[in-house]
Image (tube, grey):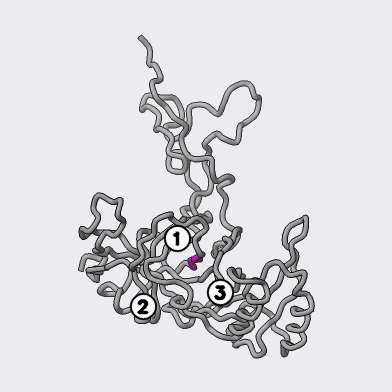
Amino acid sequence: MGHRKTHAPKHGSLAYLPRHRAKKPVARIRYWPKVNEETPRLLGFLGYKAGMTYVFTIEDRKRSPNFGKEVMRAATILETPPILLCGIRTYTHTPYGLQQLTEVWMKDPPALLERALILPENFNTEEMMQKVSQNLDQTTTIRAIIATQPNLANLSKKKPEITEIEIGGGTIPQQLEYAKALLGKTITPEEMFKTGQYIDVAAITTGKGWQGPVKRWGVTILQAKGRKTKRGIATLGPWNPHHLMYSIPRAGQMGYHQRIEFNKRILKMGKDGKEVTVKGGFIRYGEPKGSYILMEGSIAGTEKRTITLRYPARPPSEVPEAPPQVTYVSLESTQGK
């Protein structure tokens, strides 16, 4: 009796196609959630991935079988130097999507911004602000233009990342007043998030270069006595349709794709990175200098990668009111020394 196929499900997910390299090393947020809060707030933040450790926490989810017990969890440390709100941009909603109306820039931007942008000699902030106020009746969305400060983190680079973060909550006039008050000032993660909150984490995954179908799609390695290739696929498809279908697992780029993970919990926040730095520092990163966020679980990307944090798009229905109780953070060397 010949070999009969018993169970061979489709290999690899077709949910993210094409699997090509991301355009930029900073994740792009395509959707900002609507916030039903009376006071306006920024809906995002940027940090840098330092490394991982493990923690012991008291399980506070009531439906969990370990409720009230001490459990061990993996945790990721992000270094989060304050971000600078260097501009405000307003949009109006059109049948073709959002269209930019006006923008305002801070009066004396720091020299660091010149590493990323060609700046004029001086911005006429008052005149720009008047235009924003005149177009307020057409404005439907207000976003903050923010710049990171990598010089305050344990990184060798000085060029800031510049991106837009939407302002949510309140009315449009309230959002504008909120943005005006913060223009030219720095914002810390403690002002935006609180310990125990669930947030969405977007990042560019670790690049693995060009890989074959076994590693890239998880297809079965063919039998040793088979003809020609072993780490390929047995057929490129049927006679009809008479072309190569997009769903066929082929070799190609693996990793360095944008991914967003929903509802990752903030276990701890602090101003001194030494509190969570392992002995000898994190491999390929070193010791975080300033403020940090300790996130539950793993986060996409390599060390030093820019991580985008977003207000949750679909938060869990049950969120414990009290912040998580972290009983122990492992500071043992990750190099086994």
Among the two numbered marks 1 and 3 on one chain, the one whose residue lies closer to the N terminus: 3
Occupied quadrant, residue 56: bottom left
Question: Which span of residues is magenta-colored?
Answer: 306-310
In the displayed structure, would residue 152 be above or below residue 232? Answer: below
Q: Position of residue 13 (x, y in %)?
A: 49, 40
Q: Looking at the image, which residue is at 46% across and 53% down? A: 208
Magenta segment's dominant SS is strand
Identify the disc placed on residue 270.
Answer: 2
Mark-to-mark CA distance, 1 and 3: 34 Å
Q: Is residue 315 left or right of residue 328?
A: right
Q: Looking at the image, which residue is at 42% across and 27% down? A: 8
Identify the disc placed on residue 39.
Answer: 3
Q: Are marks 1 and 3 in contact (CB under 8 Å)?
A: no
Q: Nearer the viewer, residue 74 or 51?
A: 74
Q: Nearest to the eye among marks 2 and 3: give it.
A: 3
Q: Is residue 119 left or right of residue 270?
A: right
Mark-to-mark CA distance, 2 and 1: 22 Å
- Which residue is tagged 1? 301
Occupied quadrant, residue 331: bottom left
- Category of crowding for the residue at label 3, using alpha-carbon neighbours closer than 10 angstroms: few (below 14), some (14–19), many (at least 20): few
- Category of crowding for the residue at label 1, using alpha-carbon neighbours closer than 10 angstroms: few (below 14), some (14–19), many (at least 20): many
Q: Secondary structure at mark 2?
A: strand
Residue at the extreme top: 1
- Amino acid type, mark 2: Gly
Q: Secondary structure at mark 3?
A: loop
